[in-house]
Amino acid sequence: MGRTAAPAGLKLIAGRSPGRDSGGRKVEPGPAFKRVPPAAPDWLSDEAAAEWDRVIPELSRLDLVKEQDRAALAAYCEAWAVFVEATRVVQEEGLVIEARQGKLAHPCVAIARNAGREMRSWAAHFGLTPSTEQALARGGGDDGDEANPFAGSG
């Protein structure tokens, strides 16, 4: 499966120059959605609501979210909540459980692993992964071409 395309806003933040991405290609702005952060769904679990409150201010500041992103953000936040709960259970009960077949991996180990994968997948869509953070940091200054050994002089 190929890489998921980044939103135009993320491409521009990491770009070499105004209107260009990190590869120097022109970035099409895409549809002109009104960039208003979505309201948190009232059904979010407490942990998911806390994660929503943690990420929305920065995503909003960067103009990366719109009302239509509500479902994707809710899925990310609930995946985080499942990851946290499963991790806490493993911390309290241990990595293995006793069963008739002998010692087995605690089921919450797999739950945490799967929730982590889902969370990481959703997080990448909003620039919340460490690799995306590094890409954004590299795109923040005007010395992008000097730091890029592959950038040509023209």
Image: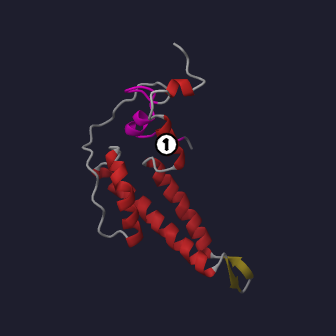
Can you tell which quarter of the image residue 10 is in?
top left
| Residue 48, horizontal then vertical, whole percent | 40, 66
Query: Of the residues shown, which amino acid type is indicated by label 1?
Result: Thr
Q: Image point 61% across, 70% down: which residue?
A: 109
| Residue 81, horizontal then vertical, whole percent | 46, 68
Name the residue furthest top: 154
Q: Image point 56% across, 28% down: which residue?
A: 147
Q: Where 124 falls versus 88 (above or below)?
A: above
Q: Assign a secondary structure to mark 1.
A: loop
- Badge count: 1
| Residue 1, horizontal then vertical, whole percent | 57, 44
Q: Image point 30% across, 64% down: which residue?
A: 41
Name the residue furthest bottom: 100
| Residue 22, horizontal then vertical, whole percent | 48, 30
- The span shown in magenta is 3-21
Dominant SS of magenta comes to loop
Q: Which class describes the residues within 10 Å of circle 1: few (<14), some (14-19), or many (20+)?
A: few
Q: Image point 33% across, 56% down: which residue?
A: 70
For disc 1, the marked residue is 4
Asked if residue 11 is among those painted magenta in the image, a careful observer would answer yes
* Nearer to the camera, 9 or 75: 9
**Figure colour scheme:** secondary structure
In the image, is 45 to the left or to the right of 107?
left
* Nearer to the camera, 9 or 113: 9
